[in-house]
Image (cartoon, helix red, strand yellow):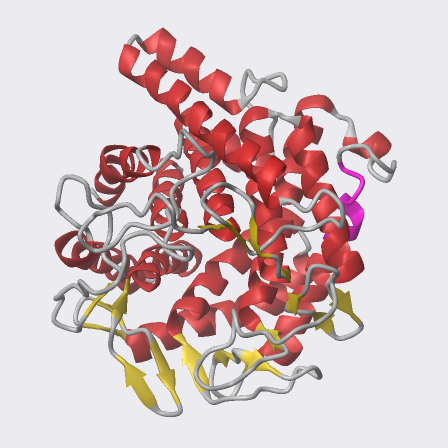
Amino acid sequence: MLSNEVRGHLWGRLVPFWEGLRDRENGGFYGWMDSGLTVDREADKGCILNSRILWFFSNAAICLAGEEGERAALSGGAALPGAGGQPAWQRAREREQAQGPQREQDRADALKECADWAYRFLRDRCVDAERGGVYWSLDYRGQPEDTTKHTYNQAFAVYALSSYYRAYRDREALELAERLIGVIEGKCFDAQGYKEALDIDFCPIANDKLSENGVMADRTMNTLLHVLEAYTEYLGACREEEQAFGVFSRRGLEPGRPGAWRRTVEEKLCWILNLVAERVYNPERRRQEVFFDLHMESLIDLHSYGHDIEAAWLIDRCLEVLGDEGLTRRMSPILRSLEAEVYEKAYARHSLANECDRGVVDEKRVWWVQAEGVVGFYNAYQKTGERRYLEAAEDIWGFVRAHLVDERPEGEWFWYTDIEGNPALEKPIVEPWKCPYHNGRMCMEIVRRSAG
């Protein structure tokens, strides 16, 4: 039932909503919709928002093409069935064509059109062609507005471009992803970890964009997590290419060719996982620390429930792609403890609280935290067999369906509700951080996992 409901929600609500936000005059997608569902056509366009939209439509195409081939490729199993290197969208069209419904053929075409639209905007507008890297935001016409080069933003572009490559086999997109990996490793990394905010020339500046709760962090768990996520997706794309064409094993280190960063990315993923185990994870409190100084010392007593349940399943996915048995043995107990702690501390009233800041629980039911709770607990059920996690995933989805989904015809999800489920009408429906990434990914992950 859960899989059927989220599948219907994906195709019936989320995809049409975001399709409708294309800016056909200036490119990209509109960057703001207020709580009254009015689009501000002259709002700035966040590059993170555009990357996440590109990721969304690319993965929707992969989802449409069939979850079994995707899982086999990511886990290093059999080659994509009948693919021969064929793009996911083309496989989807042929499959749906054989089954007959014209509507599904149209759906595959529409997904490709939207993904292509987001890709061209990222390639042509979001990337600094002169200095390299991705800007923070553009004005509504697509001109640079905030030229900050944040590591988090570079990571999401790599994530999106790798997914676009997986869906459509566009070599140019993978090459752009690899150039941005070069930016991350060459400009955004030092001996102790990944930097955060950099100016247009990659000089460090204050990290106000990813600092909260009264601290100014030099490093964050959040950026580290999403570099890991992006590199996992890139490595998955390399594995799929190798399955389809058998090329990366021969030219995996050849500069300028797809897969040139594969070995480095594998090494950096191992490095990140070990850093999580040694410095980010707090074994006494069974949580991740959130904000750090330059030397990776924690700055605040903060438990981010959403990030912990998200990290548990994202790291599990990374371990599956890496296939490193030693790291899996080291990390799995940490991931199971994160899941258990979130279940025990945050799960109540059919939903997840937001965070606990210096002993004070924020009871808001934030949209992305609930989405990650559904996936994270479903993953915990798959890893442990404990039925309480499956029941929690289904229960949180019930809360989302009843309270967070905006039932207005033109709506999507509310930003958050109070503990009683009353939505926050003062927050926008779309803005640079409010996107189809968490809720769309929730739907696709449940569909993919249920197919197994």
Is residue 264 part of the magenta span, yes or no?
A: yes
Residue 379 occupies quadrant: bottom left
The residue nearer to you, when weighing 154 against 332, is: 154
Q: How many marks?
A: 0
Using the image, determine if residue 393 lies above or below residue 332: above
- Residue 162 or 76: which is nearer the viewer? 162
Residue situated furthest bottom in the rendering: 359
Q: Quadrant of the N terminus?
A: top left
Residue 107 percent coordinates (x, y):
34, 21
- Is 336 in the magenta? no
Q: Residue at x 45, y 70 (%)?
A: 308
What percent of the width, then of the height, locates residue 397? 23, 54
Tell which of 202 and 152 is nearer to you: 202
Q: Residue furthest right?
A: 254
Residue 435 in the image: state x and y as whole percent: 38, 50
436 displayed left or right of 115: left
**Residue drawn at 59 percent across, 40 percent down:** 125
Quarter of the image for residue 119 reads top right
Asked if residue 305 lies left or right of residue 52, the reply is left
One can see residue 446 in this view = yes
Q: Residue at x 66, y 73 (%)?
A: 205
Specify the segment rendered in magenta.
Answer: 259-265
In which quadrant of the rendered image does the C terminus lie? Answer: top left
Q: Is residue 333 visible?
A: no
**Residue placed at 62% from the left, 16% from the top?**
84
